[in-house]
Amino acid sequence: MGIASRIRVAAGEAGSVEALPETIPYFLADRIKAGIIRWRYAPGSSLRETELAAEYGSSRGPVREALRILELQGLVVHAPRRGFKVKEYTADDLRHLYRLRAQLEGEVINALSDKDVGSLTDALDRTNEAMRGFARKRDLEGYFSANIEFHQLMIESTQSSVLRTIMNQINAMSLPIRFILLLDEFSGRAAYQYHQQITAAIRDRNFRLARRLTMDHITANLVRVVDVYAAALSRQER
């Protein structure tokens, strides 16, 4: 059974085409990106312009532009005369990506140390509560979205355009991997305590602890990311 059959795929599949907005390439990029993150378009699979154009009710030009946008985000690769494919990671790619993300998330915590974090921690508490609710309902999609929001709230609160730009790139590349890891271990348990611990450390202005907790939370997945990713690829090929 493929990955896509195990999850709710993003709305807008064939047979449910929406009216396209003016910024068509960016709209299409967002939709294709959602499919890549959720393994509807699996790593290594071809992204054929004609098929995507038919699926989304577009012409090939905007689809090609959308794929170029995703190429810049590191989600898609292009080979001359062979077209676009979804990026497939090697084991070393995965390790490098997770170590780099951990270091950069640590920098995000450091950048919060001279900020008023009251409104941030209030927002993080609300997001944590939303995550607990989604976990209780076994709503993986809702939990995944809230998890992304949790980390994005911290990034935005740094008020650093440099960190925002770099983290946007790293997060785009990491989201398909984060999704498959969550899909592999999502248990529906009501509390994922590490988010609460990170929030509490930031509220107490214990940024050294918050940095360590954040980095440990990310690098803990280094033990299993390679195996989970390889197993997901194997299931997809069956």
Image (tube, rainbow, N blue to C red):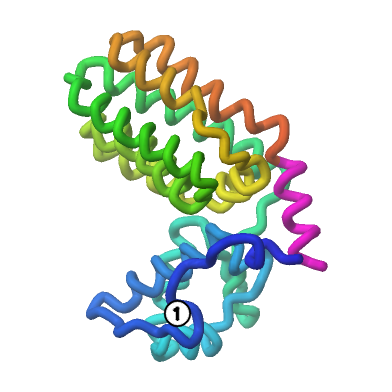
Direction from residue 124 to residue 194 in the image, left or right: right
Considering every residue shown, the one lying at the far front of the view is 137
In this view, the residue in front, 145 or 213, is 145
Say which residue appears at 26% left-offset and 32% top-offset: 123
The quarter of the rendered structure image containing the N terminus is bottom right
Camera-nearest residue between 34 and 77? 34
Mark 1 sits on what residue? 64
Asked whether residue 185 appears in the rendered view, the answer is: yes
Residue at coordinates 61% horizontally, 72% vertically from top-left?
79
Left or right side of 52 for 128 = left
Examine the rendering and report whether any part of residue 174 can be seen. no
170 in the magenta segment: no
Q: Position of residue 99 (x, y in %)?
A: 58, 31
**How many neighbours does mark 1 have within 10 angstroms: few (below 14), some (14-19), or many (20 or more)?**
many
Above-or-below relation of 115 to 170: above
At a point 60% along the width and 62% down the height, the residue shown is: 39
Q: Based on the displayed image, in which of its 4 quarters is residue 151 positioned?
A: top left
Q: Main secondary structure of the magenta part?
A: helix
| Up/down of 189 relative to 211, above or below | below
For the residue marked with disc 1, what is the amino acid? Arg
Residue range of the region highlighted in magenta in the rendering: 226-238
Query: Which quarter of the figure has residue 163?
Result: top left
Compared to residue 7, the image places residue 123 above or below, namely above
Secondary structure, mark 1, is helix
**Quarter-of-image position of residue 164:** top left
